[in-house]
Image (tube, grey):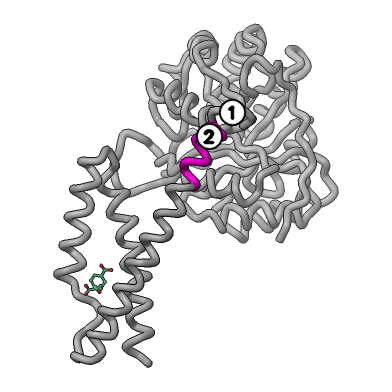
Amino acid sequence: MELNLKPLNLPSDQKRPFVIAGPCSAETEDQIMTTATELAAKGCHMFRAGVWKPRTKPGGFEGHGEPALQWMKQVKDATGMYIGTEVATPEHVELAMKYGIDILWIGARTSANPFAMQALADSMKGLDIPVFVKNPVNPDLELWIGALERLNAAGIEKLAVIHRGFSSFDKTIYRNQPMWQIPIELRRRIPDLPIICDPSHMGGKRELIAPLCQQALDLGVDGLMVEAHCNPDKAWSDAKQQVTPDVLDYILSLLVVRDSAWTTEGIQQLRHEIDVLDNQLMDLLSKRMRICREIGQYKKEHNMTVLQTGRYNEILNKRAAQGSLCGMAPEFVKQVFEHIHEESVRQQLEIVGK
Ligand SMILES: C=C(O[C@@H]1C=C(C(=O)O)C=C[C@H]1O)C(=O)O
């Protein structure tokens, strides 16, 4: 289904990317007001804080709920910043509206659950509020788009997504794998949908915030959501990934904001060269497939199996090694040849089955 989108019209000062900042959790009135005042003084336009916290295990701090919404409202009245919080149930939505929350976001654990998403969408019917949907914890673009479709079908047209990375069993430097190809594909499919990057949850540690922000801006995201806390080391949740408003301001001041317009002569010439090379690649690929079909014919006549694992492995290993010599990631080259092999086997199966 096509999404009907309306512009968010969020405040921004043009010089810097649009940034939503604030602590992971609303802990105390003092923590909220101190952090918000410092962020407002740095020119931040939108304040975030978790009022209900979905924790992996029971027994941790799960948020103050309604009293914390009152502190959020005080932030809005005192600083003029827009305020946003995460909602996961229809009751959360109702309370957030009661306290004048300006934007709602839906967390990764909720966007992964179609029942929860439908209940939220139903509870938002008739509301005119921007809703930001975090990617589901698992790398499933269709599930992410499905969550947006449910909200859109309920009449929510001011939509955006938050890319916070994807859970993985493998331990890497990231808390959640960026898997940039997923937001890139989302941008290709729904170009008008704003994408906001959350480097705090992606990186899981302070040192990764700056490089992740820069990568996200280099890819052309529309904004950032960064966790900031007046005393990060003492934070009640996610202490390692929060920074002070001062540090956030410093990180933002170092970011290079690029222009997505593509008008320069130089790039046109280079793109032409890419087109020529892509045409050659297509030509070579179709020649390779023609030879594979001939091999298929031979296999049919000599009663050989289509899949030849030994040869397939040889090709994957050799090409991956060649790839690294040419400055490409061996994993990438392997994946390319896995796809080529898949098509080659499909074409041979057609011939053998005739
Ligand atoms: C082309 C062949 O058939 C299959 C396809 C291969 C390929 O595309 O390179 C390699 C091994 C086989 O699984 C072959 O046997 O050589």
Q: Is residue 172 magenta?
A: no
Left or right: 121 in relation to 146:
right
Residue at 58% over, 52% down: 144
Q: Position of residue 65 (x, y in %)?
A: 64, 34
Task: Specify the segment rendered in magenta.
Answer: 267-275
Residue at 44% over, 45% down: 166
Left or right: 111 in relation to 330:
right
Q: Which residue is mark 1?
A: 265
Q: Main secondary structure of the magenta part?
A: helix
- Nearest the viewer among 36 and 187 is 187
Point out the quarter of the image occupied by ligand 1. Answer: bottom left
Q: Position of residue 229 (x, y in %)?
A: 52, 17
Q: Are marks 1 and 2 in contact (CB under 8 Å)?
A: yes
Q: Quadrant of residue 67?
A: top right
Left or right: 7 in relation to 221:
right
* Residue type beneath disc 2: Gln
User: Badge 1 local density, few (<14 within 10 Å), some, or many (20+)?
Assistant: few
User: Badge 2 local density, few (<14 within 10 Å), some, or many (20+)?
Assistant: few
* Residue type beneath disc 1: Glu
Q: Which residue is mark 2?
A: 269
